[in-house]
Image (tube, rainbow, N blue to C red):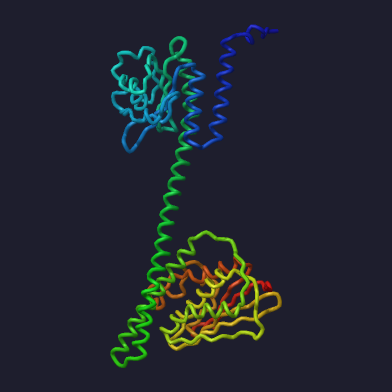
């Protein structure tokens, strides 16, 4: 039987086992975090400990500037180190990076590649150096350096140990860089989307008032003038109608891209809410000389609902009815109670909807008309938003039509919650 006492007491064996344990712990920890700064600190500290050297540093490659830069170093101010240029040519780290080979320099003094000014800049005297490349697959992303071995010179065993550390580190750094880049890209996209949404909301709001004045004066001129002047006013109103449609779409696009918010319940009289919505769109209906009528029950429908979202949904239904109804057409808005639900409808006598399109019209950006023959404009998102707002409150929205030329009715139901 072989004795184990001498092996167990061997200092070299104990040191090797301790180093291997540190490497295993390093690999486990590196795989558990994607924060780049935390990773770099862990790598340089572990490398300094297992190699028993005075300092370690990580230099990463900057592709835009084609040079290396200090990303982390033990006991040093990284911001101060980052001021030191590390070219690929004529530098020790650059040599390791470009050749992809480890390098041991146990007497660095006098090596022409050594940057003595850099050492003076941070107040650290480099006497010996061990450097290995940080590689991910076939790509070198930087260099890991160990400086000033505390006892004796750097050995091949130290080199092999640092190569193992670098292998773990390169994968972890690469993954962390990818995550960081992804987060930055997401933040940039989010910021751009927010700027766009803010612009759309602001433009829609600021243009609405002057457009309302134009519509008011043009409507007055059309009714009071005769002949050519009346025709000119009609053209102005048609152009204003197109612009108003564009503003509606801008507002709807902002809502479509906004995150879904919570439902805010209000006590309302449903008839009053629907009449208020009709007043809001009356200006648009007057441009086409359309008439809005009501079909309400005698009983007051006092209930609980999210008034803002409900109004927005019904406004979009009105806009749809006005857009696809003819001049001097009629639009009917109605409401009634059906057992545990409230039924609301907006009915028009316009161009109608083919039966095969009744569900598709609620799809985002869907248009019944072919793009090359469109007459009515719009982006096709108003109905999508209306349906989403009703669904948020536990309701449903659908369309009914007898077909082309037979008008359409949009119906929505909501749970009746008495106030």
Viewer-nearest residue: 135 or 195 = 195
Q: State the residue at coordinates (59%, 13%).
A: 14
Q: Residue furthest bottom?
A: 226
Percent position of residue 324, x then y:
46, 80
Q: Is residue 360 visible?
A: no
- Kindly indicate the quadrant of the structure image that contains residue 130: top left
Q: State the residue at coordinates (47%, 67%).
A: 252
Quadrant (top left, top right, bottom left, bottom right) of the N terminus: top right
Badge count: 0
- Kindly indicate the quadrant of the structure image that contains residue 298: bottom right
Compared across the picture, whether 351 is left or right of 3 comes to left
Viewer-nearest residue: 363 or 84 = 84
Does residue 74 lie above or below 339 as drawn?
Answer: above
Percent position of residue 321, x then y:
49, 80
Viewer-nearest residue: 155 or 227 = 227
Percent position of residue 238, x then y:
36, 81
Q: Is residue 159 visible?
A: yes
Quadrant (top left, top right, bottom left, bottom right) of the C terminus: bottom right
Q: State the residue at coordinates (53%, 81%).
A: 408
């Amino acid at each position: 039987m072989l004795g184990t006492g001498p092996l167990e007491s061997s200092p070299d064996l104990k040191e090797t086992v301790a180093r291997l344990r540190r490497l295993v712990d390093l690999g486990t920890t590196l795989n558990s975090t994607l924060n780049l700064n935390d990773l770099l600190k862990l790598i340089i500290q572990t490398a300094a400990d297992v190699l028993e050297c005075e300092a370690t540093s990580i230099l990463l490659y900057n592709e835009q500037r084609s040079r290396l830069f200090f990303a982390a170093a033990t006991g040093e101010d990284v911001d101060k180190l980052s001021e030191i240029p590390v070219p690929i040519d004529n530098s020790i780290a650059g040599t390791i990076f470009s050749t992809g080979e480890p390098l041991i320099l146990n007497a660095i003094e006098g090596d022409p590649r050594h940057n003595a000014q850099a050492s003076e800049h941070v107040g650290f005297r480099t006497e010996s150096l061990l450097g290995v490349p940080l590689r991910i697959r076939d790509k070198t992303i930087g260099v890991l350096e160990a400086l000033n071995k505390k006892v004796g010179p750097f050995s091949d065993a130290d080199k092999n140990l640092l190569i193992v550390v670098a292998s773990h580190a390169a994968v972890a750094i690469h993954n962390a860089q990818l995550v960081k880049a992804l987060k930055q890209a997401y933040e940039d996209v989010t910021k751009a989307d927010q700027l766009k949404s803010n612009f759309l909301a602001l433009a829609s709001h600021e243009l609405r008032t002057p457009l309302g004045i134009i519509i008011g004066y043009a409507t007055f001129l059309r009714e009071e003038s005769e002949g050519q002047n009346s025709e000119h006013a009609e053209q102005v109103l048609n152009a204003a109608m197109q612009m108003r449609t564009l503003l509606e779409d801008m507002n709807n696009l902002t809502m479509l891209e906004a995150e879904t918010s919570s439902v805010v319940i209000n006590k309302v009289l449903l008839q009053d809410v629907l009449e208020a919505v009709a007043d809001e769109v009356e200006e648009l209906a007057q441009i086409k000389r359309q008439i809005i009528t009501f079909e309400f029950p005698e009983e007051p429908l006092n209930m609980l609902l999210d008034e803002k979202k409900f109004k927005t949904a019904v406004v979009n239904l009105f806009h749809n009815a006005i857009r696809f109804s003819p001049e001097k057409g009629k639009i009917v808005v109605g409401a009634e109670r059906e057992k545990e639900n409230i039924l609301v409808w907006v009915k028009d006598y316009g161009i109608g909807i083919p039966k095969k399109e009744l569900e598709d019209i609620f799809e985002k950006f869907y248009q019944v008309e072919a793009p090359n023959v469109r007459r009515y404009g719009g982006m096709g998102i108003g109905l999508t938003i209306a349906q989403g707002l009703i669904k948020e409150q536990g309701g449903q929205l659908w369309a009914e039509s007898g077909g082309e030329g037979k008008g359409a009715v949009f119906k929505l139901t909501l749970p009746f919650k008495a106030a």
